[in-house]
Image: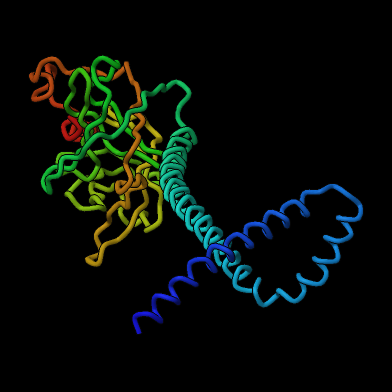
Amino acid sequence: MASDRGQSDDYRGPLRRLFLGVLVICLFGLFLVWRIDSPRVERFRAQVVDRVLPSMDWAMAPVTGAVNILRDFQSYQRMYHKNQELRRELQQMKAWREAALQLEQENARLLDLNNVQLDPRLTYVTGVVMADSGSPFRQSVILNVGGRDGIMEGWAAMDGLGLVGRISGLGRNTARVILLTDTSSRVPVTIQPSGQRALVIGDNSPAPILDFIEDPDQVRPGDRVLSSGDGGVFPAGLMVGQVVADPGGRMRVRIAADYERLEFLRVLRRYDLERIETPGSLIAPETGAAPARALPQAAAEAGNG
């Protein structure tokens, strides 16, 4: 057994070397044939390709499948990177969309301010609402304009729809606006079309009370309520709201200003506003008692002061 194994090993080595040498020679000859630039060799190569290549489809199928798989994988990889890029662009587009919506809303409010019809003699300063009072007992907002901008106490403030309130509290860079719904607010108004005069009295509710009406029988829900100018605080003709009736039958005013979206306010300049320096003339007139018809006006001045 050992001698047979030794003899097979002796034959296997030379045969392996011989086979390797013949293979190298064949490959070298094939290389030379494939590289020779001759018409006869070219025809020979064409004939070899015609005979060998069609019968080698079964051998090329795995190679073709592997190439297709590789191409599909590369295509999938490109699609994955493209999808990630589209996701990033979509996130950016969402951010731009939100910014565009905010700018659109801001622009709409500014356009509303520009569309408010005012007396040509009145000028204004536009301020941005920074904060509100946050108290159920005090209805006010703070603007980013103040004494450095020429703002004075008592000036009226409007949004794009109607009267919002008056300046009550002034700093160098900020001003506080007391809203019409605040309990300290008293605004003399005129009710159209009847022309009745009354007072809009804030009670911390969204619809302040309409009181001291000259002739309540001539007032109907839906009538327009405008500032009358009595008391010298608010200019006449500013839109306040519409008359509504509560479930108890009491007349109230639905405020025209949009208190839910106060972002910009227009402060109306009025330099002819009379300033009260001493309380004596407010408490007791210097000459006699005030006429009866002047009492509502005095009450309006006291409420707005």
Outermost residue toward the right? 39
Residue 295 higher or lower than 27, as above or below: above
Q: Is residue 51 left or right of residue 151?
A: right
Location of residue 242 with respect to 72 vertically, above or below: above
Q: Is residue 232 visible?
A: no
Quadrant position of the N terminus in the picture: bottom left
User: What number of labels is visible?
Assistant: 0
* Model colouring: rainbow
**Which residue is at a point 49% across and 36% down the rendered structure image?**
115
Q: Nearer the viewer, residue 245 or 193?
A: 245
Above or below, 63 against 8 in this view is: above
Residue 22 lies, in percent from the top left, at 64, 62
In percent of the image, x 30 and y 39: which residue is there? 164
Tell me the quarter of the picture where residue 232 sits. top left
- State the residue in front, 261 or 294: 261
- Where is residue 178, by image quadrant? top left
The reply, left or right, for residue 52 in relation to residue 272 is right
Spot occupied by residue 50 in the image (x, y as percentages of width and height): 83, 69
Give the farthest residue toward the front: 3
Q: Position of residue 221 (x, y in %)?
A: 37, 58
Locate residue 295 relative to residue 243 in the image: left or right: left
Q: Is residue 80 visible?
A: yes
Compare residues 32 and 118 and report the one nearer the observer.
Answer: 32
Q: Quadrant of the C terminus?
A: top left
Give how far across and how far down residue 210 sits, in percent.
26, 50
Q: Nearer the viewer, residue 266 or 188?
A: 266
Q: Is residue 176 above or below residue 172?
A: below
